[in-house]
Image (tube, grey):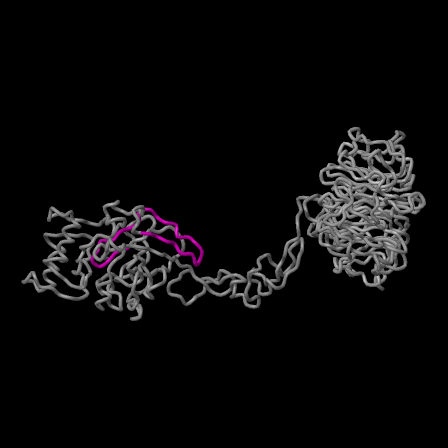
C-alpha cells in the first residue's frame, strides 16, 4: 500500500501531509509519453490529490476541486477510460471538503477519507464514507462519529479498515481500526499513545501497521515520526527509526510484499544517513543497502510512489532532476534505486504531481496541479503510456481486417480498431484481405517465393502459387515429370518450393512373417541354420526358379546382398530369401509389384541391405500384400489396404498376427503357440502340397538324397530341406518328409492342400 500528500492546505491542520492511494497492476515496457486517447478536456478546477483505478480502466479522482470539465463536482468524480466523466457514477453535490485519500476494496466499494462532513448533502459522521460502485453511499457501512480529520486509509486482507489522522474513539487515538462493516475493532487499542497527528498508514502482509506522522513517541517509547504497530495496536519493538528523517517530512510511504518500506518526501537524511527525498528501509528500521538513489531528487520533493510487479518504482512530485538526469515531476526507478531511462516523460507536467496510479492496461494516471503535459493541455489529470504505442487500423465493417488509410497510435487496441491493415474494402465485410502475389517471370504459372507483393487484384505477371524453384526456367515447374534416379520410385515429379528437387512415390512396407520349418516356439523366433552353415546364396534364388518379377513396377530381379549382411547374429540374423508382393486391390491373384527380400529371425522382412523396410515402386492406392517362400505355402491379404501415406511414410503389417486377414481364412496358416506361420512342405513351389500321387512334394526329397537309400542325407541349400536345418533327410528324426504329411492334415496321405489364391508360377 502507498500513501501520499494531497494538498499544502492540510499541512497547517496536522503539521503534516495527507495521502493519496494507488492501485498497482501489471507492467509493460517504456516510455512515459502522453496518452492522447485520454483527454479530460477542461479537467478539474483545483488540485487533484487522490485517485484509484478500476478493472475496466475507469479512474476515480478526489481532491479540492468543485467542478470538472465545467460541471459541478464536489471533490470526487469518476472518469471513463477516455477521460470523460462517467455518467454512471453519481455523486450529486459530492463532498463539502477536500478528499485526502481513497482505497478501492476488492468488491469494488470505495473508501474515501478527508476534511469533509457531508456527501451529497447528507452527514457522513466525520471525514469517512464508503461508496458503492455507482457512487451511492453504502448503507451497510456504519462507523463511529469522528470529529477530527482523517487523512489516510488502508485495508487489511480480511477487509478491516485502518485510518490515520487526528481522529479517535474512546479506545483508539490517531490510528483507528474498524471491522469490515465499519464498527470499531474491539481487539485494537491505541488510546492516547501517539502524541501528535498521523499522516500516513500502510499495512504489512502479516497485518502489522506502518505509521508515519508528526509524533515523537508511542507511549513512553521514543519514535521519531515513524513506528510499526502490531495487529492489536501495541508497539512493535523491532522497528526503530532512530532519529528518523530530518530537514523535512515523509510525504509518501510504500510497504512491499517483502516487508521493505520505501519513504519519499522533503527530507535529506534518515537517522544520520544521506537520503535525498527517498530511502528504503528494512522492517526493523535499518537502511536497505541494496537501494541507492545517488544524489537523489532535486528541484523539488517526492509526493507519491507506486510499485510495479517487476520491482520498478514510479515516483511523482515537484522535482526536476533525479541523480543529475532531468526528469520533470515523474520518473521510474529500478529496484536498486537507479533511474530507468527507458521511461522518459520528456518535459512532463508543468506543475506539481500529487498522486499517480496505474490502470489494468499499465498506463500511468497522474493527478495534481499541472495544466499541461509535454506541451499538451491536460488540466490537473492526465494519463501516460507505460508501453510503446503501436499503430491500430480502423475496422469499420468489423471483419477483423483494418483500413490502411485510417489509423491511430495507442498501447492497446481502441474500440473498432485492429492491428492489421489488410482490408481491401473496409466498408464491405464480404471483401477481405489483400492477396500475396508472386512474380512469374517464366510464365509457367508458378511464382518466385522471394519476390512478392500484396494487392487486392492480380497484377500482370504475378500468380498466387509461390512454388517455383527457378523462375527463369519454365521447364522447372512443380509437378513436371522428372527422374530421381531411384529404381524403387515411380511417378517422379519436381517438388515445389521450399522442397524443390525431384521425388517419386514409393509404397514402404514394414512386414513381419514366420516360416513353419525353422520356427522355434520356445524363443518365438526362427532358427538361422542356413546362415550359420553358410548356405544362403548372395543372389536371390527365385528368378532362377522361374518366378519372374512383374514388370513394370518391380525391380528386374537378381537382387544381391553384401556378404557382411550374413555376419549379423541375434534377432536380426538372416533366415532366408522370401518374396513380398503387392496384389491388386480388386484381385488376389493379379500381381502388381514383386520384391525379393530377406527374412530375419524375428520375422521382419527387409531389403537386401538386411535392415531397411521394403519399398515398392508404385503409386498410392488400394493394394493387397502377399508373401511366399520357396518351400512354404504363401498367403494373400484378404482386405485391400490403403497404402496412401506421405512420400516417406512406412506402413507396418504383421502377417504373423491372428488378426491378419488372409484368403483361405485361418486355415491358410498354421498356429504354433501365439504365432501364425506359413505352412511348410511346398518343395515343388507350385501352390499346393501333396504327399502322394503325381507331382507330390515327398518324392523330390527321396530323389535329392539319391533315390535309393532312404536313410541317406544331403547337406545344402535345397527346396527339399523343408525344416531348413541345412540337411535334406527322408527318414529319421528331424526329417523333411513328415512336415508335408502334417500340412495336408496328418492322417490321410492322399489329401491335397491347395492355394488357389496365390498362383506363384506365371
Residue 621 drawn at (x, y percent): 39, 52
* Residue range corresponding to the magenta coloring: 627-654
Residue 41: tell me if it is visible: no
| Residue at the far front in the pictured view | 220
Q: Measuring 21% from the left and 55% from the top, which residue is drawn there?
A: 632
Residue 647: tell me if it is visible: yes
Q: Is residue 352 above or below residue 160?
A: below
Please check the rendered image and state whether residue 279 is part of the magenta-colored stretch, yes or no.
no
Rendered image quadrant of residue 734: bottom left
Residue 517 drawn at (x, y percent): 20, 56
Quadrant location of the C terminus in the rendered image: bottom left
Q: From the viewer's side, name the closer residue of 690 and 68.
A: 68
| Residue at the far bottom in the pictured view | 563
Q: Position of 656 compared to 151: left or right?
A: left
Please check the rendered image and state whether residue 632 is part of the magenta-colored stretch, yes or no.
yes
Q: From the viewer's side, name the closer residue of 40 and 64.
A: 64
| Residue at the far left in the pictured view | 708
Residue 341 drawn at (x, y percent): 78, 61
Q: Measuring 90% from the left and 56% from the top, which residue is drawn there?
A: 247
Rendered image quadrant of residue 463: bottom right
Q: Position of 679 compared to 556: left or right?
A: left
Total labels: the figure holds 0
Amino acid at each position: 500500500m502507498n500513501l501520499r500528500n494531497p494538498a499544502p492546505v492540510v499541512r497547517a491542520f496536522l503539521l503534516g501531509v495527507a495521502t493519496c492511494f494507488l492501485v498497482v497492476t501489471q507492467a509493460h515496457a517504456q516510455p512515459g509519453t502522453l496518452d492522447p486517447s485520454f483527454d479530460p478536456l477542461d479537467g478539474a478546477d483545483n488540485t487533484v490529490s487522490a485517485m484509484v483505478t478500476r478493472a475496466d480502466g475507469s479512474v476515480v479522482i478526489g481532491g479540492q476541486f468543485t467542478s470538472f470539465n465545467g460541471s459541478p463536482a464536489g471533490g470526487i468524480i469518476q472518469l471513463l477510460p477516455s477521460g470523460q466523466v462517467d455518467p454512471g457514477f453519481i455523486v450529486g453535490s459530492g463532498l463539502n471538503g477536500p478528499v485526502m485519500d481513497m482505497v478501492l476494496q476488492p468488491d469494488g466499494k470505495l473508501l474515501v477519507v478527508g476534511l469533509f462532513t457531508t456527501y451529497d448533502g447528507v452527514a457522513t459522521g466525520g471525514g469517512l464514507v464508503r461508496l458503492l460502485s455507482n457512487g451511492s453511499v453504502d448503507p451497510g457501512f456504519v462507523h463511529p462519529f469522528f470529529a477530527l480529520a482523517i487523512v489516510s486509509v488502508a485495508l487489511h486482507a480480511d477487509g478491516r479498515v485502518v485510518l490515520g489522522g487526528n481522529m479517535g474513539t474512546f479506545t483508539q487515538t490517531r490510528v483507528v481500526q474498524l471491522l469490515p462493516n465499519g464498527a470499531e475493532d474491539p481487539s485494537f487499542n491505541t488510546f492516547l499513545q501517539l502524541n501528535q497527528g498521523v499522516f500516513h498508514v500502510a499495512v504489512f502482509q502479516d497485518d502489522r501497521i506502518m505509521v508515519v506522522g508528526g509524533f515523537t513517541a508511542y507511549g513512553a517509547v521514543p519514535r521519531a515520526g515513524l513506528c510499526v504497530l502490531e495487529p492489536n495496536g501495541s508497539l512493535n519493538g523491532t522497528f526503530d527509526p532512530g532519529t528518523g528523517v530530518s530537514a523535512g517530512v515523509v510525504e509518501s510511504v510504500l510497504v512491499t510484499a517483502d516487508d521493505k518500506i520505501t519513504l519519499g518526501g522533503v527530507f535529506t537524511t534518515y537517522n544520520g544517513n544521506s537520503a535525498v527525498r527517498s530511502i528504503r528501509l528494512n522492517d526493523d528500521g535499518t537502511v536497505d543497502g541494496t537501494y541507492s538513489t545517488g544524489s537523489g531528487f532535486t528541484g523539488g520533493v517526492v509526493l507519491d510512489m507506486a510499485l510495479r510487479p517487476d520491482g520498478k518504482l514510479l515516483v511523482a512530485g515537484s522535482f526536476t532532476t533525479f541523480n543529475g538526469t532531468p526528469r520533470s515531476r515523474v520518473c521510474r526507478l529500478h529496484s536498486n534505486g537507479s533511474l530507468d531511462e527507458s521511461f522518459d516523460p520528456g518535459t512532463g507536467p508543468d506543475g506539481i504531481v500529487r498522486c499517480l496510479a496505474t490502470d489494468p492496461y499499465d498506463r500511468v494516471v497522474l493527478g495534481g496541479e499541472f495544466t499541461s503535459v509535454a506541451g499538451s493541455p491536460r488540466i490537473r489529470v492526465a494519463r501516460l503510456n507505460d508501453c510503446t504505442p503501436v499503430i491500430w487500423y480502423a475496422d469499420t465493417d468489423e471483419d477483423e481486417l483494418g483500413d490502411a488509410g485510417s489509423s491511430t497510435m495507442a498501447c492497446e487496441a481502441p474500440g473498432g480498431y485492429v492491428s492489421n491493415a489488410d482490408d481491401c474494402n473496409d466498408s464491405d465485410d464480404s471483401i477481405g484481405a489483400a492477396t500475396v502475389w508472386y512474380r512469374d517471370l517464366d510464365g509457367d504459372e508458378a511464382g518466385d517465393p522471394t519476390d512478392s507483393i500484396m494487392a487486392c487484384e492480380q497484377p500482370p505477371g504475378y500468380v498466387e502459387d509461390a512454388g517455383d524453384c527457378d523462375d527463369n526456367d519454365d521447364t522447372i515447374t512443380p509437378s513436371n515429370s522428372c527422374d530421381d534416379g531411384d529404381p524403387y520410385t515411380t511417378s517422379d515429379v519436381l517438388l515445389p518450393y521450399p522442397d524443390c528437387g525431384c521425388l517419386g512415390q514409393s509404397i514402404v512396407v514394414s512386414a513381419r512373417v514366420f516360416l513353419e520349418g525353422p520356427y522355434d516356439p520356445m524363443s518365438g523366433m526362427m532358427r538361422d541354420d542356413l546362415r550359420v552353415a553358410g548356405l544362403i546364396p548372395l543372389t536371390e534364388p527365385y528368378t532362377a526358379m522361374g518366378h519372374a518379377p512383374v514388370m513394370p513396377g518391380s525391380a528386374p530381379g537378381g537382387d544381391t546382398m553384401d556378404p557382411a549382411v550374413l555376419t549379423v547374429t541375434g534377432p536380426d540374423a538372416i533366415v532366408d530369401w522370401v518374396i513380398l508382393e503387392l496384389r491388386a486391390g480388386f484381385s488376389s491373384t493379379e500381381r502388381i509389384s514383386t520384391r525379393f527380400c530377406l527374412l530375419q529371425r524375428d520375422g521382419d522382412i527387409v531389403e537386401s541391405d538386411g535392415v531397411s523396410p521394403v519399398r515398392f515402386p508404385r503409386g498410392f492406392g488400394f493394394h493387397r500384400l502377399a508373401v511366399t517362400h520357396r518351400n512354404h505355402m504363401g498367403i494373400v491379404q484378404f482386405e485391400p489396404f490403403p497404402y496412401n501415406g506421405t512420400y516417406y511414410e512406412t506402413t507396418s503389417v504383421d502377417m504373423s498376427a491372428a488378426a491378419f486377414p488372409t484368403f483361405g481364412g485361418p486355415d491358410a496358416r498354421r498356429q504354433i503357440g501365439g504365432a501364425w506361420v506359413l505352412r511348410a512342405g511346398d518343395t515343388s513351389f507350385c501352390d499346393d502340397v501333396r504327399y502322394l500321387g503325381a507331382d507330390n512334394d515327398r518324392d523330390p526329397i527321396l530323389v535329392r538324397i539319391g533315390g535309393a537309400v532312404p536313410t541317406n542325407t544331403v547337406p545344402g541349400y535345397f527346396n527339399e530341406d523343408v525344416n531348413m536345418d541345412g540337411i535334406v533327410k527322408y527318414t529319421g528324426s528331424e526329417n523333411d518328409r513328415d512336415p508335408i504329411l502334417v500340412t495336408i492334415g496328418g492322417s490321410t496321405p492322399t489329401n491335397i492342400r491347395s492355394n488357389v489364391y496365390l498362383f506363384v508360377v506365371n
